[in-house]
Amino acid sequence: MRISEYFSLPKVSSKSYKVWQRNKDVFMKDIKLNFLPPFLEPLLYLSALGFGLGRFVEDIDGVPYANFIAPALIAISVMYASFFECSYSSYVRMYYQKTFDAIIATPVTIEDVIAGELLWGATRSMVNAAVMIPVIALFGLIDIRYALLIIPFAFLGGLLFAAIGMCFTAVTPNIMSINYPVLLFITPMFLFSGTFFPLSALPLPVQYFAIAFLPLTHIVNGIRLIGYGTLEPVLLFDLAWIIVVCAVLLLVSINMMKKRLIV
Amino acid sequence: MFGFLGPNGAGKTTTMRMIQCVSPLTSGNLEIFGLDAMSRPREIKSHIGVVPQENNLDMDFTVYENLLVFSRYFDIPRDEAERRANELLEFVHLEDKKDTMTESLSGGMKRRLILARALINRPKMLILDEPTVGLDPQARHMIWDKLRSLKKQGVTIVLTSHYLDEIEKLCDRLVVMDYGKILVEGSPAQVIEKYVGSGIVEAEHNPELIDCLEKKEANYEVIGDLVHIYTDNPKQIAEYLTMECSLSKLSARPATLEDVFLKLTGRRLRE
Ligand SMILES: Nc1ncnc2c1ncn2[C@@H]1O[C@H](COP(=O)(O)OP(=O)(O)OP(=O)(O)O)[C@@H](O)[C@H]1O
Ligand SMILES: [Mg+2]
């Protein structure tokens, strides 16, 4: 496969909705269990870090520590939800459960399957955000008037991390190897994307690196701006970064998976 | 009903996957229902039902849900899908297992459910890759019955199997393939007739017998300590051998597809 083929437009049809629907139906079977983490995690993090640790931390850029980390918690959940959905979970469906094999024997094509998986990953992120927003708003940590805007933003961010996860699924030799991108990419991002302390505390070159290459930076920043109700122009930059990278990675991830699966 | 025979690794599954439009062709062209497999996979796949070699039921769902979820991929409306699912569960005798998760089904039940799933779109063509592997005789007979009744309803059936009796019983035409190439084609009777004759005489191997056969220019093969003599007239040959070559341990039997298969593809084990 030549490099340019990884960027070619895959023929995705509305049938990908059926694949999305399949995953949604499985999700709904355990809906209570699936809703628990996004409900519980903000409570735990906010008590321990926001209000516990926060008592010893000065205001950051004029906001109390709990208010500072609350939007980041949503962003982190957006990242984890779709990344894990489209890495470990997609790999299990592809390799162990042979779900994809069964589906492509029907009029649904492999491109539809991957697109459906990506959309589902993004949906998971959006659902998590939607559950977390009222919990966080209950503490008065985000501006509820703008909070609804976070939901479509979470979908977009989810799509980005779904595509990233899917790229790793396409190349991983086995399920254990997905631990590498988690340890080397996702975990550092969790800590160094302006999540628990501002980017400005980092050395300048690292700041630039984070802005250029760490997707979570833009999602944290975006959700923070929306959550505070301060819709500044810099939000457009974050949005543009996410849209461009997301579009490219969506193409690449579908083509990479196609290459892996068509034999 | 059309059968594909061949040793392990001959390329049967690969051929089935090409017919299903999931594996690409590297050369040549392939038409199904008069449609080109490479350019119109969606249309072709909407009229095909597949029983794959490896079970791939959706383990996140129950038996009944498996059929319903699958029906959505074909855009079958919900109430029609429910009707068909109930019908098909009855057809493969799994009504009692409707709400069981597929993981806890036995191997035979899984195969039956896959057959039902393959029929959810009322296919014009059914592709079965070793449909009865690992099944007990009852389950095999049940599947055969179902296949015959589908054939009567006008469904084209394409089948691969290592059970040669299965192919011999069910198929109207067959091919034997090896290393991706077709070796023979025809009806089971034709193929047997053409390659081994209608009967076989089995005798113990000894040099005297070989001399005798050489003299008569007989069509024979030495297999370990047995000699197979291919003939249209096993009785006569058997009698002749007992008289002329003074042999005692002989048996005559009709030839089967198994003899053709082994003769064409050799006896060496495949990796
Ligand atoms: N026409 C062909 N040309 C080259 N390679 C082929 C061809 N057909 C199949 N192969 C290769 O042969 C291997 C085995 O093929 P396949 O799985 O189709 O065998 P099979 O007949 O189904 O075997 P089994 O009886 O064990 O299921 C595969 O790796 C496949 O890529
Ligand atoms: Mg096979």
Image (spheres, helix red, strand yellow):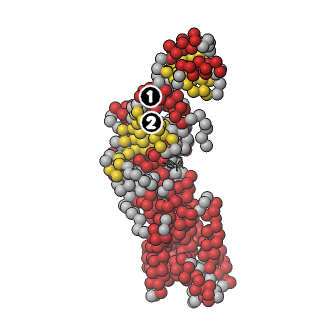
Q: Measured from the top left, where is residue B247 in percent x and y?
A: 62, 13
Q: Is residue B65 above or below residue B148?
A: below
Q: Badge 2: how crowded within 10 Å, few (<14), some, or many (20+)? A: some
Residue type beneath disc 1: Lys
Q: What residue sits 64% from the left and 67% below the top?
A: A180
| Numbered disc 2: secondary structure | strand
Q: Which residue occupies 38% across, 58% down?
A: A15
Tell me: B74 left or right of B59: left
Q: Disc 1 marks which residue? A: B194
- Total labels: the figure holds 2
Dot 1 falls on a residue whose secondary structure is: helix
Q: Is residue B267 above or below residue A2?
A: above
The chain under label 1 reads: B
Relative image position of residue B260 (x, y in whole percent): 50, 30
**Residue found at the far left of this picture:** B34
Residue at x 38%, y 51% (from the top left corner): B29
Residue at the spot x=59%, y=18% of the render?
B212
User: In the image, which disc is placed on residue B72?
Assistant: none
Q: Residue A247 location, x and y as percent?
A: 45, 73
Q: Position of residue A181 (x, y in %)?
A: 61, 68
Label 2, on which residue? B184
